[in-house]
Image (tube, helix red, strand yellow):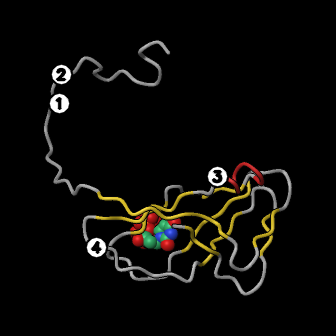
């Protein structure tokens, strides 16, 4: 679902500038789901504008207005006009875990290897 800029006047993002854009929307998301605010590929590819904290998390107990933190990673100023589509939100199920402190973890083939440890 697209998120639109609930702005009364345009805002211009200078290169590396960021802005928190209101969407005019508030949700009561059922427990066990979260909203994930994601960039729009068109804005990113055409203008270098993306969601700075992607994916932004909208908690199920949040009742405030959803905002989108945009950043301009392009080399030119970009203007966001009222009602522009600025991002999208996906509602996704997630697990709730109870953490348990232990002194050692079980062995696996990977162990602590990462960051290209498998050779590619
Ligand atoms: O892109 C975003 C991210 C968050 N929020 C709202 C909904 C979310 O439930 C709340 C808190 O977000 P988050 O947990 O990411 O914020 P925090 O920086 O950890 O602060 P807090 O102490 O408020 O949890 O802010 C937005 O509107 N847009």
Distance in Å between CA atoms under marks 2 and 1: 7 Å
Q: Residue at x 74, y 62 (%)?
A: 17
Which residue is tagged 1? Answer: 105
N-terminal label among 1 and 4: 4
Which of 89 and 20 lies nearest the eye of the viewer? 89
Residue 88, given in percent of the width and then of the height, sits at 54, 63
Residue density around tag 3, few if under 14, some if 14–19, many if 20 or more, within 10 Å: some
Which residue is tagged 2? Answer: 107
Q: Nearer the viewer, mark 1 or mark 4?
A: 4
Residue 96, given in percent of the width and then of the height, sits at 22, 57
N-terminal label among 3 and 2: 3
Distance in Å between CA atoms under marks 1 and 4: 34 Å
**106 left or right of 93 in image:** left
For label 1, the SS is loop
Which residue is tagged 3? Answer: 41
Q: Nearer the viewer, mark 3 or mark 2?
A: 3
Which of 45 and 79 lies nearest the eye of the viewer? 45
For label 3, the SS is helix
């Amino acid at each position: 679902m697209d998120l639109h800029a609930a702005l009364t006047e345009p805002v211009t993002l200078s290169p590396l500038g960021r802005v928190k854009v209101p969407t005019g929307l508030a949700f009561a998301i059922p427990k066990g789901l979260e909203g994930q605010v994601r960039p729009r590929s068109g804005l990113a590819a055409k203008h270098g504008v993306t969601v700075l904290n992607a994916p932004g998390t909208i908690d199920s107990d949040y009742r405030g207005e959803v905002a989108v933190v945009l950043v301009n990673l392009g080399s030119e100023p970009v203007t966001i006009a009222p009602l522009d589509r600025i991002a999208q939100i996906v509602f996704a199920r997630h697990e709730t875990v109870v953490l348990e402190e232990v002194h050692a973890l079980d062995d696996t083939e990977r162990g602590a290897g990462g960051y290209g440890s498998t050779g590619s």
